[in-house]
Image (spheres, helix red, strand yellow):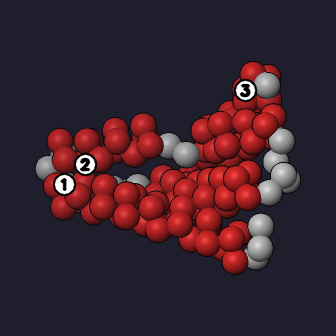
Amino acid sequence: MVFAIALGGGIGAAARHLVSTAIQEATRAPLFPWGILAVNLTGCLLIGVLAQLSESTTLLSPTTRALLITGVLGGYTTYSTFALQSWDLAAGGFNWMAIANVTLHVVLGLLAVGLGRMVVARLGA
């Protein structure tokens, strides 16, 4: 199981880099971390879906759950990076951006987890 988590972590970290870089470059907004916001929101949505599936069905074995949730999503979501970027924005005098970053991540992340769970529950899983 540890190997599955390590493998998933590598996949998630690579995906985080690719997604966050592409989105950040596409927004052309060098100060606000749109790429990390997108990664965290999609990660929250996916963890909601996978948590609901693993709790309400037998589709995910314990090893698959560990691979996907602990490994892939653990490597993909970036709350430590989020915290550092929020700190750096505030320390750089961009207080309103720091507050917006924290608020958007927390509120929209919680909503995305709930949405993921609701979608799977409504599909009957």
Q: Residues within 10 Å of mark 1 (few under 14, many from 20)?
A: some
Find the distance from the CA under tag 3 to the CA under tag 2.
32 Å
Q: Which residue is mark 3?
A: 6
Q: Nearer the viewer, mark 1 or mark 3?
A: 3
Which type of secondary structure does the marked residue at label 1 adopt? loop
Q: Which residue is mark 2?
A: 89
Which labelled disc corresponds to residue 94?
1
Chain-order first, disc 1 or disc 3 = 3
At label 1, the amino acid type is: Phe
Q: Nearer the viewer, mark 3 or mark 2?
A: 3
Find the distance from the CA under tag 1 to the CA under tag 3.
36 Å
**72 relative to 31, above or below:** above
Task: Tell me the residue at 62%/65% (across/down).
Answer: 117
Instruction: Give residue 61's position: percent from left, percent from top.
Output: 83, 42
At label 3, the amino acid type is: Ala
Instruction: Give residue 80's position: percent from left, percent from top.
Output: 42, 37
At label 2, the amino acid type is: Leu
Find the distance from the CA under tag 1 to the CA under tag 2.
5 Å
Task: Tell me the residue at 39%/58% (across/down).
Answer: 105
The count of marks equals 3
**85 relative to 122, above or below:** above
Res 48 quadrant in image: bottom right
